[in-house]
Amino acid sequence: MSKRTDVTLKDIAELTDVFYIGGTKVGAMFGEAVVFTKGGKPKYHVPIVKQHGALLAKGWLLGVQFDELFTDNLYMEISKNAIEMAEMMKERLKDKGYKFLLDSPTNQQFVIIDNQKLKEIEPHVGFSYWQNFSETQTVIRLATDWATTKEDIETLMEFL
């Protein structure tokens, strides 16, 4: 849903052999849909998945979620919020002088933060450690989703 791409799901299916569609950041209870294109499903895919404990006994429930998410373009509509909130978060972080590891057009922003500040926010802010940037700075990943609100962004800014 990034405004910086015009790639569609159809394009991805035509250009790849396999890809996945995430569910949790658009409100699914769990799961990802793995899509094998061009008849490319591995010969023993289901037995391998079963052997590694990754096949749900009631896998149809996962399918029901995606069936609903792809009805009337719901998946794309829900996804817009994550991108819009990430863009707002990025702008607010820039306004506060924060730098980024890269310019991400997605719902994930990779922020360079002083280690001292990181210790201060750690009890209050959900983030993922990404990598050390220097002896005094760390890169963290902040992610938005279907339910992120402007108020959530403002609360984050108060801690930063």
Image (cartoon, grey):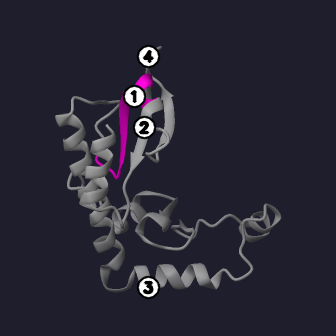
* Kind of element beneath mark 2: helix
Cα distance between the residues tagged 1 and 3:
42 Å
x and y percent of residue 52 in the render?
A: 79, 60
Looking at the rendered image, the disc whose residue lies closer to the viewer, 1 or 4, is 1
Mark 2 and mark 4 in contact (Cβ < 8 Å)?
no
Lower position in the chain sequence, tag 2 or tag 3: 3
Judging by the rendered image, the residue that carries numbered circle 2 is 121
Residue 136 numbered mark, or none: 4
Magenta-highlighted residues:
105-118
Cα distance between the residues tagged 2 and 1:
6 Å
Q: Residue furthest right?
A: 51
Judging by the rendered image, the residue that carries numbered circle 3 is 68
Left or right of residue 75: residue 132:
right
Mark 1 and mark 2 in contact (Cβ < 8 Å)?
yes
Looking at the rendered image, the disc whose residue lies closer to the viewer, 1 or 3, is 1
| Visible residue check, residue 122 | yes
Q: Residue furthest top?
A: 135
At 32% from the left edge and 60% from the top edge, which residue is drawn? 82
Residue 117 numbered mark, or none: 1
Looking at the rendered image, the disc whose residue lies closer to the viewer, 4 or 2, is 2
What amino acid is at disc 3? Answer: Glu
Indicate yes or no whether the magenta region holds residue 55.
no
